[in-house]
Image (cartoon, rainbow, N blue to C red):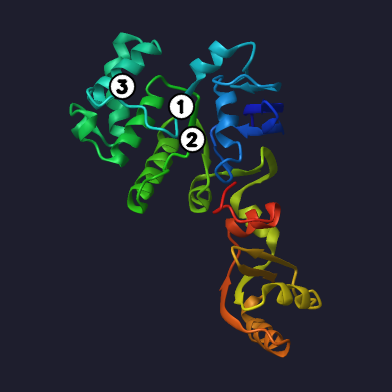
């Protein structure tokens, strides 16, 4: 399948700080590609370079066949962007926002009205189109921003933390709109997120991003399959002692301490919980809580980075 994004050792430095470090990525056309990482990992900096907002310190990238440095104008004409921070004018209606954006991007007048109606229907704001955006809920504003990014028929839509700050019910609705978008538009979506469930639900492929680097790239299901293990999470009174003693247990594939909890990677964890609790007791260690989980993206992230995504950096 053809790639719509290819990066070539793209790097961005701010003085002595390297925000994005020699990243190489390939994003296939007509897919949802996720960049998953904690706050401060460099995700927004990467998107900003791909959108031509920031100039790379070194390296480059191709977006829809155009070089982001030499053909920035053509890149910008090919993309839509929904920024992490809201960027709506409260004194305009939803329709006026779309009309202004369509005019700025040169959508022909003879098709502009129909296109705006199509987008309003896609984001389910037809009945609110002529109301001022100051009356919109947070979820409605985010949907309008997504619609604004679509009105000029872009080939690629960038969504930077699209559900950040939204309540769970509204997040679920936004996910539905993104999935509906993929069914109805000839478009590729690249989204950044630090929400595991969002990446798992929406993305065809994920790049785990940490400290400015791509650690690994694969589909969510393949990333989870790589672990071939369940996770037993323990809270004990002496974590250091437990980790030291547990090195002798050959059924433990890997062991981490995250947020004062011990995570053991094992196969068929339901058969091992009693053995682990007895082992701790025999070594004078009190087990205060124990929980069994099957592989998820949080476990994948910990495996590749050695830390939880929740804390950020």
Q: Report crowding for label 1: few under 14, some 14 to 19, many 20 or more residues within 10 A (C-alpha).
A: many
Per the rendering, the mark at residue 160 is 2
Closer to the camera in the image, 52 or 257: 257
Give the answer, above or below, for where 165 lies relative to 24: below
Instruction: Give the crowd class for mark 3: few <14, some 14-19, many >=20 residues within 10 Å.
Output: many
At 64% from the left and 14% from the top, the residue drawn is 69
- For the residues labelled 3 and 1, the Cα–Cα distance comes to 14 Å
Q: Position of residue 123 (x, y in %)?
A: 32, 35
Q: Nearer the viewer, residue 11 or 117?
A: 11
Earlier residue among tags 1 and 2: 1
Front residue of this view, candidates 27 and 253: 253
Q: Quadrant of the N terminus?
A: top right
Q: Is residue 226 left or right of residue 140?
A: right
For label 1, the residue is 81
Q: Position of residue 22 (x, y in %)?
A: 73, 31
Residue at x-position 61% and y-position 82%: 287
Check if mark 1's residue and mark 2's residue have beta carbons within 8 Å. Answer: yes
Callout 3: SS: helix
Q: Secondary structure at mark 1?
A: strand
**Residue 2: image x %, image y %?**
64, 29
Image coordinates for residue 39, horizontal then vertical, percent: 55, 43
| Residue 98: mark | 3
- Work out whether 110 lies above or below 22: above
Question: Tags 2 and 3 in contact by the CB under 8 Å rule?
Answer: no
Task: Tell me the element at label 2.
Answer: strand
User: In this rendering, does residue 24 appear at all?
Assistant: no
Labelled pair 3, 1 in contact (Cβ < 8 Å): no
Gap in Å between the C-alphas at discs 1 and 2?
8 Å
Mark 2 or mark 3: which is in front? 2
Q: Earlier in the sequence, mark 3 or mark 1?
A: 1
Question: In this image, 86 relative to 298: left or right?
Answer: left
In the image shown, does 133 or 95 lie closer to the viewer? 133
């Amino acid at each position: 399948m053809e790639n719509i994004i290819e990066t070539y050792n793209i790097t961005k430095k701010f003085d002595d700080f390297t925000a994005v470090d020699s990243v190489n990525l390939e994003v296939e056309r007509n897919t949802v590609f996720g960049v998953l990482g904690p706050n401060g990992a460099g995700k927004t900096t990467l998107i900003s370079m791909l959108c031509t907002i920031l100039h790379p310190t070194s390296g480059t990238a191709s977006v829809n066949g155009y070089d982001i440095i030499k053909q920035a104008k053509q890149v910008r004409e090919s993309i839509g962007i929904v920024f992490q921070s809201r960027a709506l004018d409260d004194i305009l209606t939803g329709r006026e926002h779309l009309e202004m954006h369509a005019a700025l991007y040169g959508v022909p007048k003879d098709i502009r009205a129909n296109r705006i109606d199509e987008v309003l229907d896609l984001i389910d704001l037809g009945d609110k189109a002529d109301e001022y955006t100051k009356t919109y809920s947070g979820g409605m504003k985010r949907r309008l921003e997504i619609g604004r990014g679509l009105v000029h028929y872009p080939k690629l839509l960038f969504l930077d933390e699209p559900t950040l700050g939204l309540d769970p019910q509204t997040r679920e609705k936004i996910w539905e709109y993104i999935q509906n978008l993929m069914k109805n538009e000839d478009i590729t979506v690249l989204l950044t997120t630090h929400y595991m469930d969002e990446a798992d639900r929406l993305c065809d492929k994920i790049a785990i991003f940490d400290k400015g680097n791509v650690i690994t790239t694969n589909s969510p299901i393949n990333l989870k399959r790589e672990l071939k293990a369940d996770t037993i999470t323990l809270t004990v009174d002496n974590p250091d002692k437990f980790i030291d003693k547990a090195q002798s247990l050959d059924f433990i594939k890997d062991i981490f301490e995250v947020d004062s909890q011990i995570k053991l990677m094992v196969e068929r964890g339901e058969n091992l919980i009693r053995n682990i609790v007895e082992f701790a007791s025999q070594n004078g260690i009190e087990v205060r809580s124990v929980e069994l989980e099957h592989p998820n993206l949080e476990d994948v992230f910990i495996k590749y980075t050695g830390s939880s995504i929740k804390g950020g950096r």
